[in-house]
Amino acid sequence: MKQTPKGEGGWRAPHRGHTPWLAGPWARSPAWLILAGLPAAGAQTAKALPEVRISASALPITAAAASQHVTVLTRDDLAALGDLSVAQALALQAGVVVDRSPRSGGYGSLYLRGADPSHVVVLVDHVRQNDPLSSRGSAVDLNTLSTGDVERIEIVRGNVSVVHAQALAGVIHIFTRRAPGTGYGGVATGGTGLRAAQAGLAREHLRASISHREEGDPDRGFNRTQSVNGAWEQGLDRQGAVSLSARLSSSLNLAFPDDSGGTQRAVRRTLESRRADSRQLSARAALNTAGAGRIELQATTLSRDGTEANPGVAPGLRDPAGLPAMDTHTDYRHHDLQALWMPPVDRDLLLTLGVEHQRESGTLDSRIHFGALALPAAFSRTRRTTSLLAEARYPWGAWTLQAGLRHDHPDDGDPATHPMLSVQRSLEGGGQWGASISRATKPPSFYALGHPLVGNPQLRTERATHRELYYASSAASPWPLRVTLFSARYRDLIDFDAGPPPQLVNRARIHADGIEWRTRHASAAGWRLQLDGAWMKVRDPSGGAALRQRPRSQWSARFSLPWGSRREFTLMARHIGRRLDSSIPTGDQELPAMNTLDVVARMPWGAAMATLAIDNLAGSRGAESIGTPQPARRLHLALNWSL
């Protein structure tokens, strides 16, 4: 979107009560358990499927084989980074910008390859987290996600709408912790109010975990996340496997409102309060049939209750009227059924055929305060979408062809078709190059369609076209390298028109062109070096308002050095270039480039593994957003036990 005061519509959602942490009737979040009794599996089908899969495709595929640029952060990677939050760990990756850390309490928006935050699908254990009731167009607040229970994070850049609807810019998939051995535990403490604890237990088929993390100052910006996870998994020998997983999570964020000028510039010193309680449940089955291939079934459900109390923003340079105070309560439900069939069509050909049905419903009830007058603004919407998808991958000598097609038929809009085509060629020595093109659409959010003051029921779907070209050297080379050129064209984006009357319209466009690279090296002496970077040019081709939080350059470097048994010393450098931001008291401003150097030392301490880290060792100055400076220097300590 263009530079908009507060995302879709400029209005923010208000507050009317709060469901207590880890409370709320599960009866309101029905889930469907799909378990079918199928014949015994064929050994050839089971053997042909790779053991490692990522979220970039409906086909069983590894990160190295995917045409998209994929980063997988493992549990070891996250431990080596120190006790970073999800937002901070993601911000170290190429092409990813997060505008606010948990410490600020602000809304942590993720910009992937310069696209809008609402164009990234975020999953937790296969359950979609995007909320169409948000005034930010279904974007996900990364600061509402717990961190102590994370096992793995997959970052898939580019269009993956064949398997994940509405993923115009990419997918972030977070998997919760798998306890090593019989369990684990950990605590952390540090500057800027960091307090964290997590624990997990595992048995043969069952696992459970709990985590708590808080950071910041309740008077200047504060974040607290809590979660409880449970799962049951059962293998069926060669017949496949079934699993159930459940998650309860809660978050509290206290922050100066968006566009207020933050801790340094805000005129009104009352903090905004945002609370959310989420409950999710998923059932999955992977079943191999005798002679009929493989069937994968999935049913998920998510329910989220949110409250928000916004004190408003005082008049200033950019807006002589300021923004009114608001209170909002939201209630969102999302249910999803999906079935994939991989028939044994050919020894080399991989083919997936699928069907998916989603039902979303949401209610927003708000009060906008104009002095003594409280103006109500409420709406409810429901959307049902049925989708058909197909994806195929075929190797032909040194070439590999992959194609996919998804057709979505929502009950409240026009049908949409999403094609994808990629070609890859293996090179002598183990490297490869590839090219791809894909198209995708995203329907307007509930907020954009239904808000009584700024909503527009005539809005069209947002559209995107992605083109990519990459080269990857052999994974066995001393310096394995991947370089990706990408070009994305977004059109019919939803933007705010001040009117009169004020209304959301389809008029914004974004062109994003850039290059991403990553390489690593592991020496015989044991030290390791990893480099990631991106250069992007993101613009509105119509010459409209400049876009926020789109730096041209960004890179990170991580150097790890072992020093004795189970001891490791890590240096992490990060650069993010100049970028535009805006606030009501200041108008548009360009934030200077930020450079940070973090140090992490890990070593055994009795039965525990101790991690000592210093963030921003050199005390570099910078700002996450206008009026919200990054911490000058922070020391934190973590202890983790494996049972």
Image (cartoon, rainbow, N blue to C red):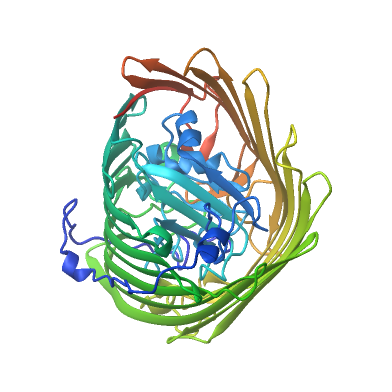
Residue drawn where x is 75% and y is 36% of the image: 477
Residue 430: % across, % down? 77, 46
Residue drawn where x is 78% and y is 47% of the image: 431
Up-down relation of residue 269 to residue 249 (above or below) = above
Question: If the image is split into quadrants, where does the N terminus sit?
Answer: bottom right
Farthest top residue in view: 564
Question: If the image is split into quadrants, where does the C terminus sit?
Answer: top left
Q: Is residue 109 left or right of residue 57?
A: left
Pick the front one: 365 or 485: 485
Residue 266 showing in the rendered view: no
Farthest right residue in view: 428
Q: Is residue 423 left or right of residue 565?
A: right
Residue 233: % across, % down? 32, 55
Residue 401 showing in the rendered view: yes
Up-down relation of residue 142 to residue 372 (above or below) = above
Pick the front one: 253 or 96: 96
Pick the front one: 563 or 191: 563
Up-down relation of residue 45 to residue 254 (above or below) = below
* Residue 578, quarter of picture: top right
